[in-house]
Amino acid sequence: MNITGGQASFTTPLSLANDYPTTSFDSYLPIPQVASFGMGVRASEHLTLQLDLNYTGWSSHDSMRINFGKQTERLKNMHTPRHYRNTLTPRIGANYKISRVVAVMLGGYYEPTPVANKYVAADVPDANRVAVTAGVALKPFPRFTILAGFEGMTSTKRAASYDYGGFSGTYKTESATTSLAVYYNF
C-alpha cells in the first residue's frame, strides 16, 4: 500500500512549533499475503463441521517507513524495524441446521502474534489472540437470508518492549463485534 502526498500536522508547545511544521509525507506499507486452506465435512444431515488454516506472510512487513516533505533537526524521516514472522492461524466452526428456515453457527480461532520480543510497538498485532464466534441464519423465503453474527476476541496479556523506540508497555486487547447482513440470491 503506497501513501503519497499525505498531510502531517503536529500539535506541540509553541516553543517546538518550528521543529514540527505541517508537511507532506510518503509511506509504503506492505500488506502481507495470505494463503488459505479450508474444508467442510457434513457430519450429518443437519451438521457441517469446518476447518480453515491461514498462513500469513507477515515477514513482508519488515519496517515502517515515513518520509517527510520538510525535515528539521527534530523531524526526520522514520525507518522503524518490525521484523515480523509468518504465522499459521487455525479456525474451526460448525453449522447446524435446526430447520429449513433457521441455522446456527459456532466457531473459534487462535491467532498467534507475528511480533517478536523487543519489537512490540503500540500498533497491531501485539499478542496472541483467541476468539469465539457465533451466528444465526434465517431464511424466511427462498433466496432471501438474514445473518446475524458475533465475535468475542481477547489477547493474552503481554509485557513487552520496542527497543528501537525506547519504550515498553503491557498490551491487552479485547473486542466484541456484532454483524448483520441481509441478502437476496438472484
Image (cartoon, rainbow, N blue to C red):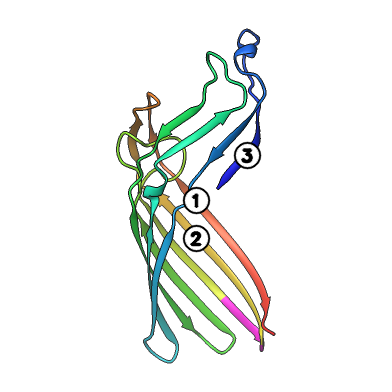
Q: Which residue is mark 2?
A: 151
Mark 3 residue type: Thr
Contact, mark 3 vs mark 1 (Cβ under 8 Å): no
Q: Identify the image quadrant of residue 39.
A: bottom left
**Residue depicted at 69% across the width and 85% down the height:** 186
Closest to the observer, 46 or 21: 21
Q: Nearer the viewer, residue 87 or 130?
A: 87
Residue 4, label in figure: 3
SS for tag 2?
strand
Secondary structure beneath dot 3 equals strand
Give the percent coordinates (x, y) of residue 144: 67, 82
Compare marks 2 and 1 and give the one earlier in the sequence: 2
Q: Amino acid at mark 1?
A: Ser
Q: Residues within 10 Å of mark 1 (few under 14, many from 20)?
A: few
**Residue that sits furthest to the left in the current view:** 117
13 relative to 91, above or below? above
Alpha carbon distance from label 2 to label 1: 8 Å
- From this view, report whether residue 117 is shown above or below residue 23: below
Task: Between residue 148 and residue 162, name the one nearer to us.
Answer: 162
- Residue 104 appears at what percent x and percent y? 50, 77
Q: Which residue is painted at 66% across and 86% down in the image? A: 143
| Residue picked out by circle 1 | 175
Q: Residues within 10 Å of mark 2 (few under 14, many from 20)?
A: some
Q: Is residue 81 left or right of residue 14?
A: left
The magenta stretch spans which residues?
Answer: 137-142
Q: Residue sitting at 64 percent across and 21 percent down?
A: 11
Which amino acid is tagged 2? Glu
Residues at discs 2 and 1 in contact (Cβ within 8 Å)? yes
